Amino acid sequence: MAKYAIIAIGLETYRYDGHGRRVLANNLSTGRVLSMYGNDGVLRRQHNERTGKTQEYISLNGSLVAEVSVAVTLAAPALTVPSYSQSGTYAVSWTGSTNATRYELESNLAGGAWSAAYNGTGRTYSASAQGAGVWSYRVRGCQGTTCGAWSPLATISVAVVPDAAPTITVPVTGLNGSFRVSWSMVAAATSYQLEESVGDAGWTQVYAGGALGANIEGRAAGSIRYRVSACNATGCSAASSIGTVTVIHPPVVTPALSLPGTSTTGSYTLSWTAVATASTYGVEQRFNGGIWTEVQNASATSQNYSGKPYGTYEYRVRACNAAGCAAYSGTATVAVILVPASAPVITVPAGSASGGYTVSWSAIGGAVEYRLEEQINGGGWTQIHNEGRNAAGLWRSGQRYLWLPCKGLQSCWVQRLLRDEVDHGVGAPAECTCGVCAGNVDHRGVHGVLECGYRRRLLRS
């Protein structure tokens, strides 16, 4: 009858038969080694779970003549996983494999590289917090360092609710009501939902799909808010932070202009009414009917001008913003009429024997007409000439003359008193053929009319 002895040394235990031969070595970590002996006490077979091999020993006349090593046979286990998970937590299990002392379980996501999920003696594995996607599993039985074939694949679809909201991106302004809203990709999301709120109104879905952005068209001017959520078949994440767009359209109202009709100094102010949606105003000027030229583009609603020379200035203004400009306003016109800076130098002859003579004067810059007045024998002053020319032909006696420079509508005249003329009785003017002049000179328009005795002739002034 066999005798048994069990000795525990650390984690490994041993068993012996009645003849003191070791028949079992057991290590909880590495497995068992089983030894079998013949009636003659010679070792015949040794099964080593640590290597997964069985050794056959053949002896003749007490001597070892052959040793045969045979790998252990390990059948592939049958693997079981659920087909779908909404939480990412589930159990993987498999059947036992004869001769297997441990099992290796591997997994991959969406056909990626295989990675070890479990290595142990059990036949179940609890997966938790698995990300969204299709997970594949395979398992094999092992004995020592020898492992059997992998099992057929088993797959599970994990569709957890996305746990993060996208990051939304919107422009600060949406010109002409068109712009793009975009967002970041979120793991586990298969689609995205974009919502819009106009002003203080409620939220309305304006896009649902798998893209990472949406084009927005045809929005009216004002403030619009946007938010986006990441979704899949299981549900949607919380909404993102809110992005706000200010929609801008070009102004449609034209300003009303204010401008004095005339300026006697060359200085004046152009102003216009403000337009609610305008950020700048473009001002154009035209001088004396020439071409239009932009002279200002700023946010102010007025402009001061100074040092303008004589002439006619027209202005028009349009309201603008980042989206464009409205049409130009109607024109406003100012006439710059400067007072002549000095009086002309007048020239008259010292005397006239005939009563006919010419009064002339120097030209003055900026003057457009000259007004000539005369005083007869100390009487009152009377205007006798008002034209752009700087000379006038006269037929008078005993007269004094006053020249008054004039420009447009101005009434600031500079006066100069002339010397007395001598009596004209010495003879008729060269232009007159009669001996005695009986008429007066009436200056009208371009010519003066001279009545000389019985003959009436036109004389150029």
Image: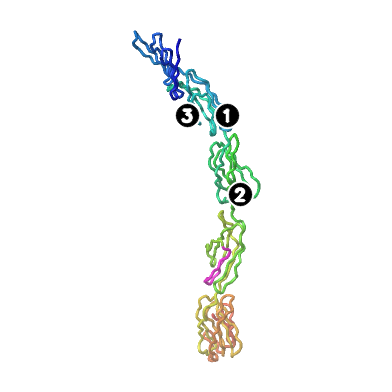
Local secondary structure at mark 3: strand
Q: Position of residue 264 (x, y in %)?
A: 56, 74
- Looking at the rendered structure, the kind of residue marked 1 is Tyr
Q: Which residue is mark 1?
A: 84
| The quadrant where residue 399 appears | bottom right
Q: Position of residue 314 (x, y in %)?
A: 56, 66
Q: Is residue 87 magenta?
A: no
Q: CA distance from mark 2 to mark 3?
A: 51 Å
- Looking at the rendered structure, the kind of residue marked 3 is Ala
Tell me if I can see residue 72 in this picture: no
Q: Position of residue 171 (x, y in %)?
A: 55, 49
Say the numbered circle drawn on residue 172: none
Q: Nearer the viewer, mark 3 or mark 1?
A: 3
- Looking at the rendered structure, the kind of residue marked 2 is Ile
Q: Nearer the viewer, residue 72 or 160?
A: 72
Q: Which residue is mark 3?
A: 116
Q: Residues within 10 Å of mark 3 (few under 14, many from 20)?
A: few
Q: CA distance from mark 2 to mark 1?
A: 40 Å
Q: Nearer the viewer, residue 180 or 138?
A: 138
First in sequence: mark 2 or mark 1?
1
Q: Which residue is mark 2?
A: 224
Range drawn in magenta: 300-314
Q: Nearer the viewer, mark 2 or mark 1?
A: 1
Residue 418 vertical placement versus 114 (above, below): below
